């Protein structure tokens, strides 16, 4: 596709459920980022992949958060035992190469935990 | 650690009036600076970026920003706004991770620009 796509666009989960959020980056983009955007806030960095390698997971808020990119393309962000504080928009961004400055963002997945 | 401060959470303005959205950053090293726009229920779209060179940067949709190193600012301006400019605007600084050769973005809290007829 022409841009970064994410699915689902909206997800409602009951507290304690596991969720999986998908990101399809721009074809050929080496770098992939996940950000979390709480209501009324700017996005905050969660994790970074270079191809299939997860080089930085310093922003993941707890061990309930897990991300993977097994074939260096599609990425999945998984949240186990969701809590209300996990409610946010989860944004995925891809970039052509590690030193490339522009990141292209997807539309995000809005997660609501009840 | 780097940080970004957007001084105004909301900016109301009338159509065709000029607007300035303020952004200050904290960094003691060379920085890359960005402005992104977010329309409702959409992702972030890059408006403009400063990497080096001329301190006045022109972007899409008639926006421009000026990098001021001494004041650590990167304010966004538009001489005449349209209703369609109503959106959330985010200033960001690039945090270069030297060991990995990649950049992660540090965002401000955002400024909601509301253009009224």
Image (tube, coloured by chain):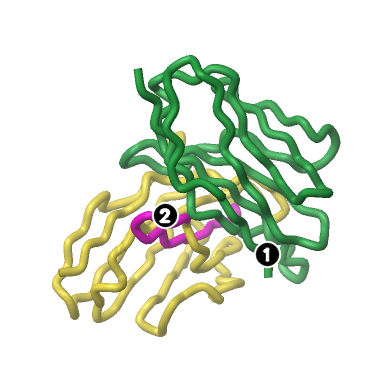
Magenta stretch in the rendered image: A30-42
Q: Which residue sits furthest bottom?
A: A63
**Which residue is at the front of the view, A65 or B105?**
B105
Q: In the rendered structure, the residue with mark 1 lies on which chain?
A: B
Residue B95 in the image, given as x and y percentages of width and height: 68, 61
User: Residue at 58% of width from left, 47% of height from top?
Assistant: B91
Color of chain A here? yellow
Which lettered chain is shown in green?
B
At numbered mark 2, what does the secondary structure look like: helix, strand or loop? strand
**Which residue is at the front of the view, B90 or B60?**
B90
- Residue A91: mark in rendering: 2
Q: In the rendered structure, the residue with mark 2 lies on which chain?
A: A
* Quarter where residue A65 is shown: bottom left
> Considering only vertical position in the picture, is A24 above or below A18?
above
Residue A90 in the image, given as x and y percentages of width and height: 37, 58
At numbered mark 1, what does the secondary structure look like: helix, strand or loop? loop
Residue A14 painted magenta: no
Residue B17 appears in the figure = yes
User: Residue at 41% of width from left, 35% of height from top?
Assistant: B87
Number of numbered discs overlaid on the protein picture: 2
The answer to whether B59 appears left or right of A9 in the picture is: right
Tell if the residue under mark 2 belongs to the same chain as the one under mark 1: no
């Amino acid at each position: 596709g022409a841009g970064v796509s994410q699915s689902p666009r909206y997800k409602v989960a009951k507290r304690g459920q596991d969720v999986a959020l998908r990101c399809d980056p721009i074809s050929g983009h080496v770098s992939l980022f996940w950000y979390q955007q709480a209501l009324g806030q700017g996005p905050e960095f969660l994790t970074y992949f270079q191809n299939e390698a997860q080089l930085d997971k310093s922003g993941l808020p707890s061990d309930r958060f897990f991300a993977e990119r097994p074939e260096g393309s599609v990425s999945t962000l998984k949240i186990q035992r969701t809590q209300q504080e996990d409610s946010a928009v989860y944004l995925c961004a891809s970039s052509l190469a590690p030193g490339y400055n522009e990141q292209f963002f997807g539309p995000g997945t809005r997660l609501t935990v009840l | 650690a780097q940080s970004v401060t957007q001084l105004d959470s909301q900016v109301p303005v009338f159509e065709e009036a000029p607007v300035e959205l303020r952004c200050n950053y904290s960094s003691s090293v060379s920085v890359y600076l960005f402005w992104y726009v977010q329309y409702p229920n959409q992702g972030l779209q890059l408006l403009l970026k400063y990497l080096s060179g001329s301190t006045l940067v022109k972007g899409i949709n008639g926006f421009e920003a000026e990098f001021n190193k001494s004041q650590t600012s990167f304010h966004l301006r538009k001489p005449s706004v349209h209703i369609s400019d109503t959106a959330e605007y985010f200033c960001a600084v690039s945090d270069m991770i030297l060991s990995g050769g990649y950049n992660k973005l540090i965002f401000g809290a955002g400024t909601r620009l509301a253009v009224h007829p």
